[in-house]
């Protein structure tokens, strides 16, 4: 879940926590978009100098809602070559988990950025998906993350390759399995043009067959989105065979039944 520091979310962590309690959740986690080494990299994340303020906001929610477990985390952009920076970030605070996400398929194009939607018109969907999954596979192999976020994000605006992508998924999930991280079932996709949870049933089925664990996320960018459509996500996970999901504390995981 996010905070206004990323410049495209609304509501303070205390408001997210209040909503979580109201809908009966017992654990939530904040994972706002992590700063880049250059503050002007893009305009949809906190600056480096705001990292302490972010941690303070989450600590305040923890203090105000002692009945709720609130984890401190980051959604970290994976770009090849950024590994040292990510390790540096990891050392700055006692994080509970890092979500590794790929938004950028090049240094300038984040595929989910509505401002860059026109890029899709002169790109071949399969080529974009191939680059994206190659990077996502590298993210899993890097062992820098506990969770790989929204695994089929390129579908966000409804662009889907006509060619079969199964081999891309298998390579990615093999890397996830080998590295020991989990993939996120992210309900935000239901609120986008693709109208589908990330990742697709096909990817989830392959994940289950390979013994890749899952975790649940709403990717809330507003208090009202906390835990949104979780019943649907749980139903999807159960329908492909999952009975357990992962939770995280101090970058260690445990499995809980759902
Ligand atoms: Zn965001
Ligand atoms: Zn993301």
Image (cartoon, rainbow, N blue to C red):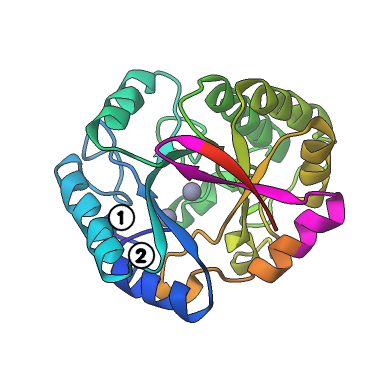
Extreme residue in the left direction: 49
Q: Nearer the viewer, residue 37 or 57?
A: 57
User: Is 176 left, or right, of 55 in this rendering?
Assistant: right
The percent coordinates of residue 67 (x first, y second) are: 39, 69
Residue at numbered disc 1 = 6
The correct choice, above or below, for 93 with respect to 191 in the image is above
User: Is 190 left, or right, of 32 in this rendering?
Assistant: right
Q: Is mark 2 within 8 Å of ligand 1?
A: yes
| Residue 197 image-quadrant placement | bottom right
Q: Nearer the viewer, residue 195 or 74?
A: 74
Q: Nearer the viewer, residue 162 or 205?
A: 205
At 80% from the left and 31% from the top, the residue drawn is: 210
The percent coordinates of residue 59 (x first, y second) are: 24, 57
Residue at numbered disc 2 = 9
In three-dimensional space, the C-alpha distance between marks 2 and 1, rounded to whole angstroms, equals 7 Å
Q: Label 1, secondary structure: give it.
A: helix
Q: Where does the magenta region start and end?
A: 235-252
Q: Is mark 1 within 8 Å of ligand 1?
A: yes
User: Is 125 left, or right, of 94 in this rendering?
Assistant: right
**Is residue 241 magenta-colored?**
yes
| Residue 136 image-quadrant placement | top right
| Residue 70 image-quadrant placement | bottom left
At 29% from the left and 50% from the top, the residue drawn is: 43
The correct choice, above or below, for 80 with respect to 78 in the image is above
The percent coordinates of residue 82 (x first, y second) are: 37, 23
Count of numbered circles on the image: 2
Q: How many residues crowd around disc 1 within 10 Å: few (fewer than 14), some, or many (20 or more)?
A: many
Extreme residue in the bottom direction: 22
**Is residue 172 magenta-colored?**
no
Quarter containing the C terminus: bottom right
* Residue 253 showing in the rendered view: yes
């Amino acid at each position: 879940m996010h905070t206004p520091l990323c410049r495209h979310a609304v509501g303070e962590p205390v408001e997210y926590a209040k909503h979580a309690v109201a809908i009966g959740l017992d654990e939530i986690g904040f994972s706002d978009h992590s700063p880049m080494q250059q503050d002007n990299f893009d305009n949809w994340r906190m600056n480096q100098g705001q990292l302490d303020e972010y941690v303070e906001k989450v600590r305040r929610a923890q203090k105000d809602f002692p009945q709720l477990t609130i984890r401190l985390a980051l959604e970290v952009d994976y770009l090849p070559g950024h590994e040292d920076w990510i390790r540096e970030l990891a050392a700055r605070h006692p994080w509970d988990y890092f979500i590794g996400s790929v938004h950028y398929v090049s240094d300038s194009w984040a595929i989910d950025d509505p401002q860059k939607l026109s890029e899709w018109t002169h790109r071949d969907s399969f080529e974009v998906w191939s680059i994206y999954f190659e990077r996502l596979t590298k993210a899993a192999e890097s062992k820098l993350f506990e969770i790989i976020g929204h695994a089929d994000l390129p579908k966000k605006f409804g662009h889907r390759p006509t060619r079969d992508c199964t081999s891309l998924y298998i390579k990615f999930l093999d890397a996830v399995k080998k590295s020991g991280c989990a993939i996120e079932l992210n309900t935000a996709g239901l609120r986008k043009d693709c109208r589908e949870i990330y990742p697709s049933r096909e990817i989830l089925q392959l994940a289950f067959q390979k013994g890749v664990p899952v975790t649940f996320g709403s990717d809330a960018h507003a208090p009202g989105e906390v835990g949104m459509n979780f019943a649907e996500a749980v139903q999807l996970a159960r329908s492909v065979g999952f009975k357990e999901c992962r939770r995280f504390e101090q970058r260690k995981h445990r499995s809980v039944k759902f």
